[in-house]
Image (cartoon, rainbow, N blue to C red):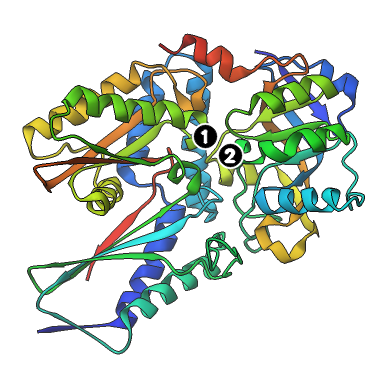
């Protein structure tokens, strides 16, 4: 048994929240830079140039990339040979979020109750997902995501006999409906299979995976590439004002499912797709 | 592409001179207001009271800024999705509000109200909160301070970069973009 204290986890969550909000992910920034090179429309090019400049200002001056610093999703892969000591894990994670949002002048956007809607002024609680995995380490991944794009995310329970074309059409329609509101160019996290809630969880988790790598399964990788090229052929472009780049990342995570169903969840994420990870 | 320097307040004449797609650098005073502030203004009007803020020829910015870091007037402060304010917008335009800044498309009701009252809808690029914060010279909450980031803040901006999204004739930049989309 390896011991990891809740204060180590708290400090890690704090540091990762700060990093994610100030430093655009390397894979995301480099995809935006290549999009900038390939766009020819002056307006699309100008927007991508501003996005690159915004990332520079955010990193250098420690100003949040986007004012919507999100409701934070925290993914913990906890090794089965780890013992967590020193207090309550959930409290420690929330404490880490609060410390980052205080220290970093990050906007606090969480309300205490979806109906009564009083701001908690702590940006907590965050949303925590834990997986038990082999080993004696904890992988901590945090993903702060704004609601401009979160509001455009969708899930659909397909029939098991539905075709790949049906799935693609659904994903494409999600992107069309999102339009400019979700701040394209977008990254799509897609969860296919499992149950209703498993698919949604996979979709969010897919956003935390590097966008420059395709799924290890060939048929899924092919679907990722096809969705990407078919959406980019639409010409929606940066901020919906036209261009070649409407999505610059499509990640699918799949899971076994039931004979009667085929859940598909699409987590829509803006051009400022943020995240940071660390192994403890 | 035209790049136009514009200063607040925005009169009917200034608004009428703008065309959809024009690039504008806006300087002067703008007021932030997003979901909760709109709800509160709406409730005040519904109770038959006057608004506690003069919106004549004013500009409202759909935004909830992040807190100001040390030695900065404001934190990250890009636009939020405008369509969530659509329900409340025609009434505010009828009371003299001249311009709005946000991101994304508007409802047909809003477009009609823009034409009726000679107003303009500007779009700012979403997700550029750090860059846009550099264009803000001062920021002060003036109304509904208890709402925190959702309070109405008075911002002084210099060369704030915008694109005309809907002009006084009702021409919509997204309609034009959509026509090109297959």
Please state if B55 lies on the left or on the right of B85 as rendered: right
Please state if A7 lies on the left or on the right of A212 as rendered: right
Where in the figure is residue A24, as x and y percent of width and height? Answer: 40, 47
Q: Residue at x 58, y 39 (%)?
A: B81
Q: Is residue A143 visible?
A: yes
Q: Residue at x 83, y 49 (%)?
A: B46
Q: Residue at x 59, y 63 (%)?
A: A117
Whether callout 2 and callout 1 share a subunit is answered: no
Q: Which mark is residue A27?
A: none
- Image height check: is A156 above or below A120? above
Viewport quadrant of the C terminus of chain A? bottom left
Q: Residues within 10 Å of mark 2 (few under 14, many from 20)?
A: many
Q: Is residue B154 visible?
A: no
Q: Which mark is residue A181?
A: 1
Where in the figure is residue B105, as x and y percent of width and height? Answer: 59, 28
Residue B163, picture quadrant: top right
Q: Residues within 10 Å of mark 1 (few under 14, many from 20)?
A: many
- Image height check: is A80 above or below B130? below
Q: Are marks 2 and 1 in contact (CB under 8 Å)?
A: yes
Q: Foreground: A87 or A210?
A: A87
Where in the figure is residue A235, as x and y percent of width and height? Answer: 41, 16
- Image height check: is A168 above or below B86? above
Please state if A75 lies on the left or on the right of A100 as rendered: left
Residue that badge 2 annotates: B81
Q: Secondary structure at mark 2?
A: loop
* Chain of the residue under label 2: B
List the single residue furthest toward the bottom. Answer: A86
Where in the figure is residue A126, as x and y percent of width and height? Answer: 41, 66
Q: Secondary structure at mark 1?
A: helix
* Chain of the residue under label 1: A
Please state if B152 lies on the left or on the right of A178 as rendered: right
């Amino acid at each position: 048994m390896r011991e990891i204290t809740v204060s180590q986890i708290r400090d890690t969550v704090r540091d990762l929240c700060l990093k994610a909000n100030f430093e655009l992910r390397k894979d995301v920034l480099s995809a935006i830079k290549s999009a900038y090179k390939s766009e020819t429309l002056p307006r699309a090019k100008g927007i991508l140039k501003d996005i690159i400049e915004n990332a520079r200002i955010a990193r250098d001056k420690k100003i949040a990339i986007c004012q919507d610093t999100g409701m934070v999703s925290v993914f913990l892969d906890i090794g089965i040979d780890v013992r967590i000591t020193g207090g309550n894990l959930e409290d420690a994670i929330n404490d880490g979020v609060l410390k980052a949002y205080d220290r970093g002048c990050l906007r606090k956007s969480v309300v205490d109750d979806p109906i009564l809607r009083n701001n908690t002024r702590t940006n907590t609680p965050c949303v925590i997902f834990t997986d038990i995995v082999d080993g004696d380490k904890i992988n901590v991944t945090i993903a702060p995501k704004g609601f401009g794009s979160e509001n455009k995310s969708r899930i659909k329970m397909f029939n098991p006999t539905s075709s790949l074309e049906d799935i693609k059409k659904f994903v494409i329609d999600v992107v069309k409906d999102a339009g400019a509101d979700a701040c394209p160019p977008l990254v799509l996290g897609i969860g296919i299979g499992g149950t209703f809630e498993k698919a949604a969880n996979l979709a969010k988790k897919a956003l935390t995976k590097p966008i420059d790598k395709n799924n290890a399964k060939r048929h899924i990788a092919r679907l990722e590439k096809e969705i990407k090229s078919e959406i980019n052929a639409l010409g929606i472009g940066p901020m919906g004002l036209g261009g070649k780049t409407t999505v610059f990342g499509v990640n699918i995570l799949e899971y076994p499912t039931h004979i009667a169903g085929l859940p598909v969840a699409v987590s829509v994420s803006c051009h400022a797709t943020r995240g940071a990870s660390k192994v403890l | 592409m035209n790049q136009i320097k514009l200063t607040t307040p925005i009169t009917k004449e200034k608004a009428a001179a703008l065309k959809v797609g024009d690039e504008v650098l806006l300087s002067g005073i703008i007021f932030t207001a997003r979901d909760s502030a709109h709800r509160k203004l709406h409730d005040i009007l519904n109770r038959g009271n006057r608004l506690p803020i003069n919106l004549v020829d004013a500009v409202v910015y759909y935004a909830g800024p992040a807190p100001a870091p040390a030695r900065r007037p404001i934190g990250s402060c890009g636009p939020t999705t405008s369509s969530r304010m659509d329900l409340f917008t025609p009434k505010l335009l009828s009371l003299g509000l001249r311009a709005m800044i946000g991101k994304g498309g508007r409802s047909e009701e809003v477009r009609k109200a823009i034409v009726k009252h000679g107003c303009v809808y500007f779009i700012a690029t979403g997700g550029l909160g750090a860059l846009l914060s550099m264009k803000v010279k001062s920021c002060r909450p003036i109304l509904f301070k208890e709402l925190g980031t959702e309070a109405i803040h008075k911002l002084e901006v210099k060369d704030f970069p915008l694109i005309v999204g809907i002009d006084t004739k009702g021409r919509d930049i997204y309609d034009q973009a959509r026509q090109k989309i297959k």
